[in-house]
Amino acid sequence: MKNKLAHDHKQSIQSALKAVQDTDTIFHLTETFKVLGDPTRLKMVMALTEEELCVFDIAQVLSISESAVSHQLRILRTLRLVRQRKEGKLVFYTLDDEHIEDLIRVATRHHTE
């Protein structure tokens, strides 16, 4: 059966296929966006774009328990969105790299423009 619209977009289709064929990248991006889709975790990441913070500090900023902060940080660490640094008995958290901050900045700009 012939397509009703007679046009050839093979090059466009091939280009689009390249963009979606890396299933590993698609999986990791999906997981990152899922994690950032939670308001508490997004607030944590946004706070960490400004300052390195310990669990107590994050709990104060978000008005949630330290236990809740620790649970969310574990999820963020698993996806390598944040990293930790120990100083004596304190553990400080920061964004894992500038790409996370860039992602938040671009999404914020998209929303405000």
Image (cartoon, rainbow, N blue to C red):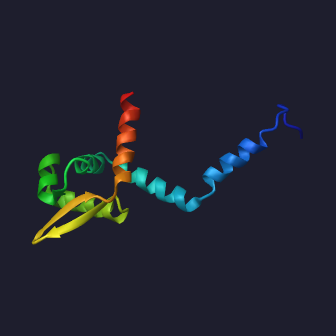
In the displayed structure image, the side of residue 8 where residue 107 appears, left or right: left
Q: Residue at x 24, y 65 (%)?
A: 84
- 111 or 62: nearer the viewer: 111
Quadrant of residue 65 within the rendered picture: bottom left
Q: Nearer the viewer, residue 4 or 21?
A: 21
- Furthest-front residue in this view: 98
The quarter in which the N terminus is drawn is top right
In this rendering, the answer to whether 30 lies above or below 108 is below
Q: Residue at x 26, y 60 (%)?
A: 73
- Expressed as whole percent of the image width and height from the top left, the position of residue 14 reads 72, 48
Q: Is residue 42 left or right of residue 6?
A: left
Query: Looking at the image, which is closer to me, 43 or 19?
Result: 19
Q: Residue at x 38, y 32 (%)?
A: 111
In this picture, residue 75 sits left or right of residue 4: left
Report the number of numbered marks. Answer: 0
What is the x, y in percent for residue 91? 16, 66
Q: Name the spot of residue 77 as percent of width and height, x first.
A: 31, 63
Farthest right residue?
Answer: 1
Quadrant position of residue 21: bottom right
- Residue 101 lies, with reference to residue 87, above or below; the image says above
- The residue at the far bottom in this view is 88
Looking at the figure, which quarter contains the C terminus?
top left
